[in-house]
Image: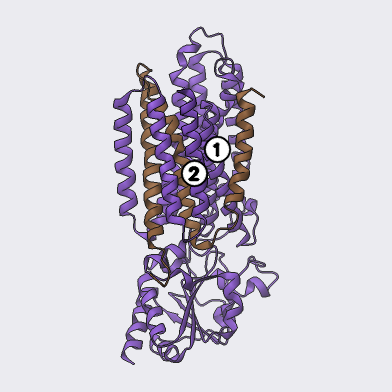
Chain colours: A brown, B purple
Amino acid sequence: MSDPLMIGLYVFVLAIFVGFELITKVPPTLHTPLMSGANAISGITIVGALASAQLGAAFLANLLGFLAIVTATVNVVGGFLVTDRMLHMFRGKGR
Amino acid sequence: MQTLETLAYLLSAVLFIFGLKRMAKVRTARQGNLLAAVGMLVAIVTTLVATRNIDIAWVVAGLVVGSLIGAFAAVKVPMTGMPEMVALFNGSGGIASALVALAYYFMHQGAFSGGRLTMAEVFTAGSAPTLALSLLVGGVTFTGSVVAYAKLAGKITGAPILLPGRHFLNLALLAGALLLGVLAAFVVTSPTLMAVLLAVLLLAAFLLGVMLVIPIGGADMPVVISLLNSYSGIAASMTGFVLHSAVLIICGALVGAAGLILTNLMCKAMNRSLANVLFGGFGTADSTGQGGKEGYTTVKEASPEEAAMILEDAQSVIIVPGYGLAVAQAQHACKQLGALLEERGAVVRYAIHPVAGRMPGHMNVLLAEADVPYEQLVEMDEINPEFQNTDVAIVLGANDVVNPAAQKDRTSPIWGMPILRVFEARTVYTIKRSLSPGFAGIKNELFEYENNLMVFGDAKAVLLKLIDELQES
């Protein structure tokens, strides 16, 4: 069980179940914001991108890392902002 | 320090879970999004603090450039352009995961200099194949999303592009990519050859992404966007396996599950299997396709003036929006008409079909932008029993989702698809440019119904005329 691959697999499968449980009943009103919010969360790969910008690494690795940071940041910043913008518009009768 | 770092990532994963949970309810959704954003910030700060030897120049440059592009796009995009924006953001997440995996390889390429060890021996047997998989899934997500963007933005035709032998070609590409992955991970020991294999693998993934999305028609885009969203999560998870990062694996899995749920909902709303959507090559061009009065015999037509006269006395009105509303940018005019009818004492509601538009929830976003309270937007199952007690139903740029053939004609290609039962309303006004068929490329029997009247014209122009007439009376 100490094999990181196996632990990772456990975490992966359990997290998928958590995901299904969390989002089974979503009102259609929220389908778009939920999708774009989830999309922003998939930008978590930024963590890996940041870690790959190491001093003294090969130039190619740094360049790829830089591009990864840019694209992941676009995903994160754009995703959360646009979701917030959409959700800001949803209002009930009372407001 | 290591413990602190791990705990911080755990905190960020918990914040994502709470955030997603809150995003599933209207009242807490905005807060949920904020929680998830805080979770992301925690993860980013933790990485910056915990990673030794970080090259701050690259990091700052990347963060600044990415933030500027992302923020600019998010603030500038009009609500009608939301489906293509979501597709692009999704694609950028996918390519980021693939790039991280590739950068990881080149960062450690030095370890192969002896030329005797395979990637699995250097990176462990778990990391090496998942590195190949994150290139595959990330690459497919990237080009698939870009093609989806091009279709949604009208840069290429929305009609399915069907290449001969595409199923075989796709299968060959997938098998080839997997084979390259196995070779790179377990067999090859030369670092140069390994790099070449990974690069070719990424190119094959790019090609596969294009090939998988071009045969899918415009109106099936809600399914494709949800599925690509799921892929971008899976790609992040795979990258998490490479880097042994639990937070990446967890978040990727959450997003993957969320995307699958939406994909499934969209398929159900069309009564089609995922395989049929992905490989069926269903549908024709968008509703702007050719086709005239052929096939229709008893179509009745009304002018906006006549329609306004009936609307004056209507006690209950249901508006049925579709993709045509987005194309005509008629959401504000639509809201204005609704408000005017309400002032005159009518009950006004909007009937939302789950796949109306080009992404899940498209109509809700458009109408929210026009300030329609969300209580007035009613789901299909709830509104369907109401049509029979409704004076007027106004079909605004929707077509296949109101076609009674889905329930009455067993031979129809859309047989069994859940529809909005507008034909049960006392009077139906279908506002449409012409009698051209919708996405399914078939005749809409509704147009020949006794109680249906066609009001020909651009959705926005017709709505503005209706508003004028109602205000004068």
Subunit under mark 1? B
Residue drawn at point x = 34 percent, y = 45 percent? B70
Residues packed near mark 1 inside 10 Å, few (<14), some (14 to 19) or many (20 plus): many
Residue B156 x %, y %: 42, 52
Kindly identify which numbered label has been placed on residue B300: none
Dot 1 or dot 2: first in sequence order is 2
Residue A5 x %, y %: 61, 26
Discs 1 and 2 share one subunit: yes
Q: Nearer the viewer, residue B1 or B362?
A: B1
Residue pointed to by mark 1: B250
Residue B407 x %, y %: 66, 73
Q: Nearer the viewer, residue B158 or B344?
A: B344
Q: Tell me the quarter of the image containing the N terminus of chain A.
A: top right
Residue drawn at point x = 40 percent, y = 47 percent? A79
Q: Report if residue A25 is visible in the image.
A: yes
Kindly identify which numbered label has been placed on residue B16: 2
State the separation of the CA atoms marked 1 and 2. Answer: 9 Å
User: Seen in the image, is B376 located left or right of residue B339?
Assistant: right
